[in-house]
Structure formats: C-alpha cells, structure tokens
C-alpha cells in the first residue's frame, strides 16, 4: 500500500472471472475479481459490498473473523471506488438469495482486498433508472455509461456490428474504407468543411455518405463493397439525428432491384436476431404512392390499423368554401376516420386542435362525430351537402360511434398532420395489431419533387436511376418519373434507403440539367464521376442503413444519444469535452483563416 494515497497497486493480480460469471456453479472456487463498488452495507460488523463490472454484479462479504485487516479496510469503501478482491465463492443462506440476479445464489467471502482507486461521489446513482436531466448525464458521460441501460445498448450495438459484417461477408462483400476528407457535393444537408493548410483558401468536406466513392468502386471492378462508416451532416438535431452518425454502406455491381432487396432482407433479419427479434421473410412491399395515400408518410407503421381517405374530388365544387378554395389552389382534402371512438371526448378534440395548430402548423382541425342515431355532430356539418355526407359516409364506412378528422391544405402539410394524428391516436386508442415489430419495403419513389420556389429537386439524392420504362418521361413529364429507390422501414422508422444508380453518364447529366445545374457547374462538381461513368460503368446499386437509428429501435431506446457512446446535444455540443471550442490564433493563421464575431 502506498502511504501517500492509501491505495494499492494492482501488482501481479489478474482477474480470474467477471462479476456476472460468479454463479452457483463456482461454489468452492477461489476467484479474483475487479470492478466498481455499487454500494456498501454494514450489518452488525459484517460488511457487504455489491461489486459491479461490465458483465454484472456480485455480492462480496468482509467478515472480521475471516480477515480482520480486509474487514477494517472495507470500512473506507464508497460508491464507485475501484477495487480488486481475492476470495472464495460460497452459497448465500436461503433467506438472502436474490432471484433477480444471475449471481443471486452466491457471494464471495473476501480474503484479500486491494483498493486501486478512490472516487468522487457520482452526480447521480449508477442505477437502471435515473432522474438526472440529460445535460447532467451528458456532462458526466463516464458515469452515465456505467448504468445498465447504456451498457446493454452498446453491447447490442457491438453485436449488431458483428451480425451485419458476418451476413455481408457470407455474401461475398469486401469491406473497403473510403476517405474522410473529400470534395463538397450536394447530398441533402450542409457539409462540414475542413480548411486545408497546404492549399490556403481551399476546403475538404467531411462525407455526408460515401455515395460517390462507392459508385467509383463499382466502376473500378470491386463488384461488392461494404463498410460501417462515420458520416457527417451539419443540420439541426432531433431525437433521431446527430451531427455525426454511423452508416452501414453497401453496393453491388451487375445487380437488379430484386437482388439488392434479397440482400437487405438477409442483413435485416440477421441484425434483428441479435436483439432476439424474429423477422419473417419475405418483407411486405408498398409503393410510395400507396404509402402516401393510405398513411400520409413514406415510412408507415402498418401495425396501426387506421388509414387515411382522400376526399379532394368530393370538394372540388363544394359549397363549403373552406375546403373548395384549398382544392382550387392545388391542395388536397383528406380525412382520418376512427370507428368506435366514443372515448375521445370533446375536450380531447379541442386539445388535438390546439396541438396541430401550434406544433404542426395546421390551419385548424375539422371533425365530425356520428352519434348513436346516425346524426352528425360537428361545427362543419351545416356546411356539408347531403351528397357530400353520403360520399364521406361511403368512403370512410362511417357509422354510429365514428369520429372523422379532416385536413384541407397543401398536400405535404395535410399528409404530415394526419399521419401524426394517425400514430398518436392509434397508439392511444389501442388500434395496433399484435405484432411487436413490422419490417417492410417502400418502393417506386418519385425521383423529383418541387421545392418551395417551384423548382425541380431530388427526393433523396441526385444519383438514383429512373425505372427503365419511365426514362422517356424525363423530358415530357419529369415529376412522373419513378426511381429505382427502396426504403427499409421498421415500426414506422426508416432504417435506411438505397437505389440503383445512374450508370449512364448521359442520363446523369440530364438529371443534373433538370435540377437547374449549369453545365459548367455540373462539370466542376461532378466531372470526376461523369468521367468515371464514361470509362465503362456497370449497372450498380446499393443501400445505406442508419446504424444508430437501427440500434435505437432494437434497444427500445427513446433517443439516439442512448445508443452512442459520446453523443452531441441538440445544439451540437459535446458537454463532456466542451466541444466545439475556440482555437488559438496561431492555428487560424496556419490555415489562413480569420474568425468574424457574429453580430449580437
């Protein structure tokens, strides 16, 4: 023992077992354990300590008549002290057995104790649950990571890594790394830029995805590629989004949509199995158009047994001006019918209306309730003609007890509002079938959509190949062109997306042109890719799983931050290491940069 600190050095000691491995089969064995003190209890001279490590927790016992010196020194132990002990495994007395622990039938009677390090009191209890707020947990992340939920989540994440690697290696994929310092190209979000010291005034971009690199690998003849890769997007944070994230990236040459989907099914099934989730093949498929029509979103949770109904044509010439005027401006009228909904009170409807106005940007929330006699109770009922009522009744199958919510607005907003209500009310009212997990493919996405200024832009990314039968529409009706795009959706969460790529340079150039890229701009940004396609590019396609999001789903975690070791806050800050932070002027000078303070 060192006099100055009162601490032992580890010396020649080496752990023989992990705490969670000390079960009844080890009774009578001598073990050497190392870990953290979870808690200490002094019961009439006998000291009990719960010792914790990555594999679990075991009770260790200090008795004055077994080892007086150890017993005396155990009195100084406090929460999170780091110790090693040598002792013998013995059975607990029947009345002290803990059936909730794998090690609950035994304890370790300690003969030797070494205190390797003391510890300041933790800012919150290292327990299954904590009432600490998230900022405190992130600031003290090393303590938070000791808690069982995060230990389990990161273990599951590791197992998911291994399952994915094994599944892809079995299918002849090569794991190849691509650069972190690359060229800035449009991927759908802001790039993180890295200034070059050797090329003053020039910048690298951190990759939003390895999209172009994996296409170049296919052109280079590698046939099947994958990597588990870090990606970066400078965008606003949400519960399911981080500035830096992990992606399972894969690409195949000489492939078809069906072959890619077969690989995705195999990888998804293998990954879900790591969490004990059995996913049946083949996965159900739904087109993008059908998903938007029935569910208002392209990542539907089909376990919820509620569907939207389109009534746009019904109100094209209606006397109800609030709905007709929306249709005349190119908007839609849709509704969400909920049958046997008497439990939804008028007060709850008012709260829903306030919610969609304030949180979702709705203009309002029209509704109709069908009473026991078939009458319509609603502020809008007097504005609806008998013919309109009959059509609504027919299309929604309305009956006594039905409650129907309406949205009349631009299609994106109306769909988004009703999609949110569908999930919230479906879960609240128990309109969910018995499946714990549902995985499906969403296919046939459009390639283009209009931005707020009415210009064509891409739905996912600009490299998606059109369906062969839609190629001729690129010039005549580009918004009707369907892409070879596919998403994997689990319980209403998009696990990832992919497509076949444009392997023809002329088609890729035409798509850039339709999106408004000048020829010179196209060559500046994508000339290297277009030259590669012209060098002899095979048909190819691939996919990217959002690894963090997938792990979050499998772990049942409420946030991505619970399945990432060192995450950022919603403001993009690392509270543990205090990043981002200013740098010295000397470093800025080396990079030929000057910081301009933002205006207050």
Image (cartoon, helix red, strand yellow):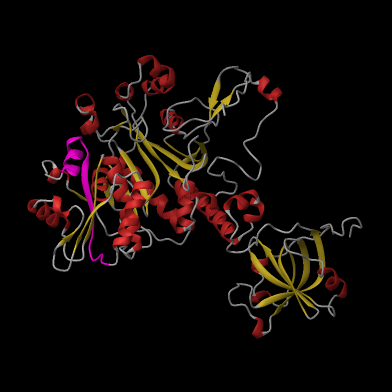
Query: Depth check: 532 or 570 in front?
Result: 570
Percent coordinates x, y for residue 41 in the rendering: 74, 73
Provide the residue span drawn in magenta. 321-342
Extreme-top residue of the structure: 520
Q: Residue at x 49, y 56 (%)?
A: 557
Q: Is residue 377 magenta?
A: no
Extreme-bottom residue of the structure: 94
Q: Is residue 440 visible?
A: no
Query: Depth check: 26 or 205 in front?
Result: 205
Q: Is residue 345 visible?
A: yes
Locate residue 145 relative to residue 320 in the image: left or right. Answer: right
Q: Is residue 324 magenta?
A: yes
Q: Residue at x 30, y 37 (%)?
A: 484
Residue 129 in which image quadrant: bottom right
Residue 109 in which image quadrant: bottom right
Percent coordinates x, y for residue 28 in the rendering: 73, 77
The C terminus lies in quadrant: top right
Using the image, determine if residue 103 lies above or below residue 332.
below
Residue 261 in which image quadrant: top left
């Amino acid at each position: 023992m060192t006099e100055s600190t009162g601490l032992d050095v580890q010396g020649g000691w080496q752990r023989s077992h992990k705490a969670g491995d000390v079960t009844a089969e080890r009774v009578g064995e001598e073990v050497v354990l190392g870990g953290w003190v979870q808690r200490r209890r002094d019961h009439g001279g006998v000291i009990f300590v719960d010792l914790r490590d990555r594999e679990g927790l075991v009770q260790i016992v200090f008795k004055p008549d077994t080892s007086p010196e150890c017993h005396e020194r155990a009195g100084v132990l406090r929460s999170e002290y780091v110790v090693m002990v040598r002792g013998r495994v013995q059975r607990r007395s029947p009345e002290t057995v803990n059936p909730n622990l794998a090690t609950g039938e035994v304890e370790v009677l300690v003969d030797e104790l070494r205190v390797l390090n003391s510890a300041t009191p933790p800012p919150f209890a290292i327990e299954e649950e904590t009432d600490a707020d998230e900022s405190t947990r992130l600031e003290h992340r090393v303590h938070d990571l000791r808690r069982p939920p995060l230990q389990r989540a990161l273990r599951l994440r590791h197992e998911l890594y291994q399952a994915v690697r094994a599944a892809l290696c079995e299918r002849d994929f090569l794991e190849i790394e691509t650069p972190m310092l690359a060229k800035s190209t449009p991927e759908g979000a802001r790039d993180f830029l890295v200034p070059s010291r050797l090329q003053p005034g020039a910048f690298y971009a951190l990759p939003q995805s390895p999209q172009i690199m994996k296409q170049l690998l296919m052109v280079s003849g590698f046939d099947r590629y994958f990597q588990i890769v870090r990606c970066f997007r400078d965008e606003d944070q949400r519960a399911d989004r981080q500035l830096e994230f992990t992606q399972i990236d894969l690409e195949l040459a000489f492939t078809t949509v069906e072959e890619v989907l077969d690989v995705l099914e195999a990888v998804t099934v293998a990954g879900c199995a790591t969490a004990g989730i059995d996913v049946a093949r083949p996965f159900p498929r739904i087109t993008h158009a059908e998903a938007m029509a029935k569910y208002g979103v392209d990542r539907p949770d089909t376990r919820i047994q509620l569907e939207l109904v389109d009534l746009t044509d019904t109100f094209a010439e209606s006397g109800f001006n609030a709905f007709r005027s929306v249709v005349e401006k190119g908007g839609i009228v849709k509704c969400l019918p909920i049958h046997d909904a008497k439990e939804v009170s008028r007060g709850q409807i008012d709260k829903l209306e306030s919610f969609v106005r304030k949180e979702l940007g709705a203009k309002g929330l029209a509704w109709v309730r069908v009473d026991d006699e078939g009458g319509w109770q609603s502020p809008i009922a007097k504005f609806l003609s008998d013919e309109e009522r009959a059509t609504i009744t027919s299309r929604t199958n309305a009956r006594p007890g039905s409650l129907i919510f309406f949205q009349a607005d631009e299609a994106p907003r109306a769909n988004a509002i009703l999609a949110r209500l569908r999930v919230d009310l479906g879960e609240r009212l128990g309109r969910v079938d018995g499946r714990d997990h549902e995985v499906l493919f969403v296919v046939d996405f459009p390639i283009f959509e209009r931005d707020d200024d009415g210009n064509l832009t891409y739905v996912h990314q600009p490299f998606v190949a059109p369906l062969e039968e839609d190629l001729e529409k690129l010039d005549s009706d580009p918004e009707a062109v369907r892409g070879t795009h596919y998403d994997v959706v689990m319980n209403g969460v998009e696990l990832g997306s992919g497509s076949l790529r444009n392997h023809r340079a002329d088609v890729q150039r035409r798509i850039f042109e339709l999106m408004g890229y000048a020829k010179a701009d196209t060559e500046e940004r994508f000339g290297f890719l277009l030259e590669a396609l012209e060098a002899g590019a095979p048909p190819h396609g691939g996919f990217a799983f959002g690894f963090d999001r997938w792990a979050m789903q499998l772990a049942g975690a409420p946030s991505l931050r619970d399945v990432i070791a060192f995450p950022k806050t919603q403001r993009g800050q690392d509270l543990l290491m205090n990043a981002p932070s200013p740098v010295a002027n000397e470093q800025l000078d080396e990079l030929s940069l000057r910081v301009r303070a933002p205006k207050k």
